Image (spheres, helix red, strand yellow):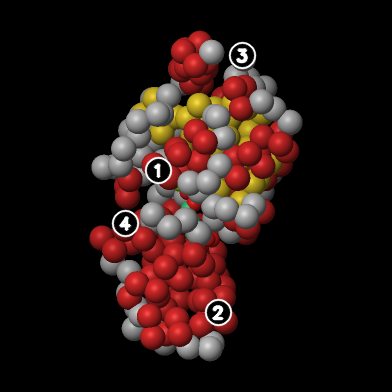
Amino acid sequence: MKLQALIFDVDGTLAETERDGHRPAFNAAFLELGLAWNWDVALYGELLAVAGGRERIRHYAQTHDPARVAHAGFDALVLALHAAKTRRYLALVDRLQLRPGVRELIKAARSAGLRLAIATTTTPDNVYALLASHLGADALAWFEVIAAGDMVARKKPAPDIYQYCLEQLDLPAASCLAVEDSAIGLAAARAAGILTLVTPSAYCLAEDFRGAAAVLADLGACELGELQAIHRRDIAIHA
Ligand code: XBP
Ligand code: MG
């Protein structure tokens, strides 16, 4: 089956957002709300096993500050922290940089008439801001589907966000290729039956990417023709 669409993950794939955006934004929010929490690089690497900012905050509190979880105001605190974190993230999004080759691959895919979509766990506003800031305001319209955050019940590694994306595109999984940076993202795409190219992000370098169609350091030297060949080869293997 011919490759018809590329489905991009966002965090870690389009840019090193976890390293340069989300972690600093979480820590700024903790400070703003007067909490003595601080997520260093090593701890944040572990916390990335939990997708979703609110889910990550809850998981951290349950494991590191259980007394606070028992408090009546805990649910409201999680929401307030996440709202502050999103505000902080949006304030620094212009300072992020796209990873090598991302801009060029998106451009080549558009020129070749491939359809484009996004499947991410992060908050939709974060995606809109990243795309607009680094690819231009028009870029939002280049992606037929921007599937993000709470649009589905279960976050990655569940396949829900990819399944939702396929439904919206009205395409079979076999006609798509996902681009991911993490093992949980790979697991989500594969569970939806989508072949996946992995470009590991800074936090994910040591993860196990068995099951990926290919693993490349980044998209810098990646021609669209190479992706089409990877898709053709793996579709034949899995047929
Ligand atoms: C990355 C995530 C997100 C972000 C935080 O998702 O797991 O949770 O770290 O985003 P992906 P929010 O790799 O699928 O883009 O705080 O907005 O939830
Ligand atoms: Mg990711």
Name the amino acid type tagged 1.
Ser
The part of the image, by quadrant, that contains residue 201 is top left
* Marks 4/3: CA–CA distance: 37 Å
| Amino acid type for the residue under numbered disc 4 | Gly
Badge 4 density bin: few <14, some 14–19, many ≥20, Cα 10 Å: some
Where's residue 18, x and y in %? 41, 55
Element type at mark 2: helix
- Amino acid type indicated by mark 3: Met
Q: Where is residue 116 in the image (x, y as percent from the top left)?
A: 63, 33
Nearer mark to the viewer, of 4 and 2: 2
Say which of marks 2 and 3 sits in front: 2
Q: Name the residue under label 4.
A: 45
Q: Which residue is under mark 1? A: 182
**Counting residues from the N terminus, which is met first, the one under dot 3 or under dot 1?**
3
Which residue sits at x=54%, y=64%?
90
Disc 2 residue lies near ligand 1 with CB under 8 A? no
- Answer yes or no: do the residues labelled 2 and 1 have beta carbons within 8 Å? no
Is disc 4 placed on a helix, strand or loop?
A: helix
Please name the residue that numbered disc 2 is placed on. 75
**Sequence-earlier tag: 4 or 3:** 3
**Who comes first in sequence, dot 4 or dot 2?**
4
Q: Which residue is label 3 attached to?
A: 1
Q: Which of marks 2 and 1 is nearer the N terminus?
A: 2
Please state if 72 lies on the left or on the right of 50 as rendered.
right
Taking the spot 69% from the left edge, 27% from the top edge, the residue there is 171
